[in-house]
Image: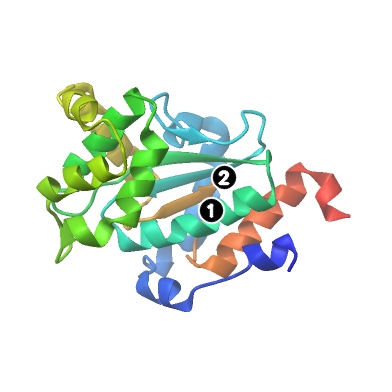
Amino acid sequence: MNRKMVFGLSALALVAAFVVGSSMYKGQRAGELDFMAQENVSTFIRMHSPMLGDAAAKVHIVKFTDPACETCAAFSQFIEQAMAAYPGKIKLIVRYAPLHEGAPEVVKILIAAKKVNKFWETLHALYASQEQWTQHHQVIVDRVWPLLERANLDVAAIRAGMNDPESERIIEQDLADARTLGVRKTPGIFVNGKALDPFGVREFKQLIESELGANYPELRR
């Protein structure tokens, strides 16, 4: 099985679970985002944003996520597949859009984990155990800590970092950028400034390969 076949695996249930935003914005939004990607890059990427991948990568995936969002957790595997299939060519930037009740507190955990260089491990642990600390689309923060301890993360350091008032500013900034970009549901995915709209695994694959071909001509051969 070649890498494109692996990357192309889709989950119909995942796509069905995601409710696409109003279609009346699609044409107008695409044009706006193309302009903003050139003129207002900071709307997509902020200094505080966690990044994964080669610094020289020419394809940027920006993901607005809510750690309590089931689709965010499920869709992460497709982003990982893309990055594994094209090593060094794709960079992931995570932005926060905590829309579920109680989700901002979990985002503060992620912000604190980044300060101790454990962001990606913490995000992975949260996604993997999501059903254990959410109930009826609400976050139960007290259930998070034992899960992080079992993942061998420094819970004491993360707890201490949550008290930093800067966390509130980061959340407010990311939510403001999400509104500017028209993100009304999570995950909100952009590839080189282009919105993944309509949302879906097949559409994501097509958008990634289009941007890879545009930026790496050797992949078109």
Closer to the camera in the image, 123 or 210 = 123
The colouring scheme, among rainbow, by chain, secondary structure or one colour, is: rainbow
Estimate the x, y position of residue 23 in percent, counting from the top left. Answer: 42, 68
Q: Against 210, is 107 above or below?
A: above
Query: Mark 2 is on which residue type?
Result: Asp
| SS label for mark 1 | helix
Instruction: Read off the residue under disc 2.
Output: 34
Q: Number of marks in the image?
A: 2
Q: How crowded is mark 1: few (under 14 residues within 10 Å), some or many (20 or more)?
A: many
- Which residue is located at x 21 percent, y 42 percent? 106
Mark sitting earlier along the chain (2/1): 2
Name the quarter where the C terminus is drawn. Answer: bottom right
Query: Mark 1 is on which residue type?
Result: Ile
- Can the viewer see residue 66 in this picture? no
- Which residue is located at x 49 percent, y 33 percent? 51
Estimate the x, y position of residue 80 in percent, counting from the top left. Answer: 54, 52
Give the left or right position of residue 118, taking residue 59 as reference: left
- Which residue is located at x 17 percent, y 24 percent? 160
Label disc, if present, on residue 28 of the rendered structure: none
Estimate the x, y position of residue 212 in percent, counting from the top left. Answer: 71, 49
Give the left or right position of residue 83, taking residue 139 as reference: right
Instruction: Read off the residue under disc 1.
Output: 79
Closer to the camera in the image, 189 or 67 = 67
Estimate the x, y position of residue 73 in percent, counting from the top left. Answer: 38, 57
Q: Could you tell me how far apart the alpha carbons at marks 2 and 1 are, in whole angstroms?
A: 21 Å
Examine the image and state in which quarter residue 187 appears. Answer: bottom left
Mark 2 vs mark 1: in front = 1
| SS label for mark 2 | helix
- Which residue is located at x 33 percent, y 48 percent? 125
Closer to the camera in the image, 148 or 6 = 148
- Can the viewer see residue 187 in this picture? yes
Name the quarter where the N terminus is drawn. Answer: bottom right
